[in-house]
Image (spheres, rainbow, N blue to C red):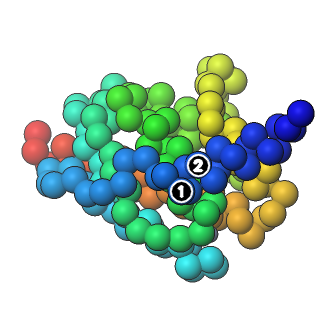
Amino acid sequence: MPGLEDLYREIILDHYRTPRNRGELDPPAVKIDGHNPLCGDEITVYLAVDGTGDDAVVTDIKIGGQGCSISQSSASMMTKAVIGKQVGEINAVMRRFKSMMGIDNIELEEADSEVDLGELEALQGVVKFPVRIKCAVLSWNTLANAIAASAASAADDA
Ligand code: ZN
């Protein structure tokens, strides 16, 4: 019987080989680049957000760039985890994910324990390889910048 680690490896490979939501979005979607110099991973997040604040909804997300299997599969899983979700929910998933990655300056909120990470759990083995943690969180850090940029542009429009 295949163990959990085999299942996780399969999920990671599946997202690496068949990345979800690859492509670009036209403005007014924001476009933010992220880079992990330790590994050479590059990622571009295109983000379309409807509304403002924690209630704003991510209506679409696309990923460009290239990098190692961990960075690419993490980005692919991330798109599935955030599309159609509110910014407040996404921030909760982000906190849980970073906490799972052993990033210790994350302040979890009480409700975060109810957050379901779904396929993102497959990346939990990465925490054993500290140099790869930056690969796994690159897409999330880039997403955070994209959310901030889209909030800033919404404020400019108001
Ligand atoms: Zn990498």
Vertically, is 56 above or below 145?
above
Can you give x and y, in whole percent of width and height, for residue 79 in the image? 44, 43
Corner quadrant of residue 118: top right
Q: Secondary structure at mark 2?
A: helix
Q: Is mark 2 in CB contact (under 8 Å) with mark 1?
A: yes
Q: Which residue is mark 2?
A: 14
Can you give x and y, in whole percent of width and height, for residue 66 in the image? 47, 70
Work out whether residue 59 or residue 80 is closer to the camera in this orientation and state it.
Answer: 80
Mark 2 Cα-neighbour bin, 10 Å: few <14, some 14–19, many ≥20? some
Hey, what amino acid is under mark 1?
Arg
Q: Is mark 2 within 8 Å of ligand 1?
A: no
Q: Residue furthest front?
A: 1
Q: Which residue is mark 1?
A: 17
Work out whether residue 105 or residue 71 is closer to the camera in this orientation and state it.
Answer: 71
The structure residue drawn at horizontal position 43% and vertical position 47%, both measured from the top left corner, is: 20
Hey, what amino acid is under mark 2?
Asp
